[in-house]
Image: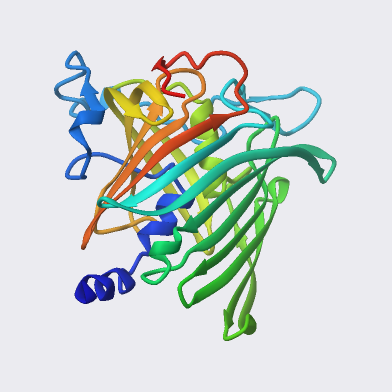
Amino acid sequence: MSDMIKKIKSIEYRLLPQLLLIPALLVTNAVWTDSSKVRTDTTSIDSVFHDTSQVSITLPLENKKISSLSPFPVVENQAFKKGEKITYSIHFGFIRAGSATMEVQNETTLNGRSCYHIRTTARSAAAFNFIYKVEDVVDSFIDKEGLFSWKFDKRLREGGYKADMLVNYYPQDSLADVTFIRYKDRMKVYKQQKYSVKTPPFALDILASLYYTRTQKLEIGKSLFITNHDNKKIYELEVKVYQKETIKTDAGEFECLVVEPLLRGEGLFKQKGKLKIWLTNDQYKIPILMTSEIAVGHITTEVEKIEGISGKIPARIRSDE
């Protein structure tokens, strides 16, 4: 047991908080899944992605129409709204490791524009704290009409690692101002950096990218491409759409699309293991189940509760609530 604890603490990419906070980047093949929860649609394609003509390229500014009244893009959004809250449980193998939430907290105004305030939280379970304690909060403020980023705050408290990354975006200037702070001991600042990054117009932070993806039409055998910003990096994320699967959870049974995010080149999410995510196959595209394989086992993030969606969720086959 002590050897396993040492291995968990030495994981280079700290996959637990990534699974808790960034459920957009989770995917297929060679990852652990409880087969009793999944039923695959055998009518799905057999040879996806061999024919490059099947790939649709969608950068953040594509599928957006420019308003005649302003230079800002507009994205049709039927996927989420204020008040939506999704609660997840996180398991390391058969051990409950923690919980996470994704919430559209409210609508606010930044730089004269209406914005969604989206918050994700990650908390390790009390029994898991002796291995690796996690108390993370990420806030993204995204334009209500264009779904691009205005502000992004990431506050990580992971074991002995404590850091903040605070970003202000200037979309019309294609610029992001970043402040990075590392703490030690009793939250004393021992390292602070401030710098500016040239970004693509109307850039997306990683959390905004997830919510943007939820608004897009996803088709089996086609890919979605999104340009993201994180820290000093600008990188392209390809989201592959594989097949339909039916997933059983404590929140009910859902028909889902299986997607795999892939990075081209170096980036924040380059890892040794693969990531997998199941999104509801409807206009909401709610992340239902996420898995990742790591060096010492598997981490699974599964929906427990869905709140703030009025009416029926079309992809829900059966409710266990």
Image coords of residue 142 (percent x, y)? 67, 41
From the viewer's side, name the closer residue of 105 and 143: 105
Determine the image quadrant of residue 193: bottom right
Give the residue displayed 43% in from the left and 36% down from the top.
303
Determine the image quadrant of residue 92: bottom left
Give the residue displayed 31% in from the left and 26% down from the top.
247
From the viewer's side, name the closer residue of 90 and 150: 90
Q: Is residue 223 left or right of residue 226?
A: left
From the viewer's side, name the closer residue of 184 and 114: 184
Numbered marks: total:
0
Q: Is residue 117 above or below residue 98?
A: above
Q: Is residue 53 left or right of residue 282?
A: left
Image coords of residue 23 (percent x, y)? 43, 44
From the viewer's side, name the closer residue of 188 and 321: 321
Q: Is residue 268 visible?
A: no
Give the residue displayed 54% in from the left and 73% down from the top.
162
Determine the image quadrant of residue 54: top left
Q: Quadrant of the N terminus?
A: bottom left
Give the residue displayed 44% in from the left and 58% down from the top.
125
Image coords of residue 266 (percent x, y)? 35, 59
Q: Is residue 134 above or below residue 173?
A: below
Q: Is residue 219 visible?
A: yes
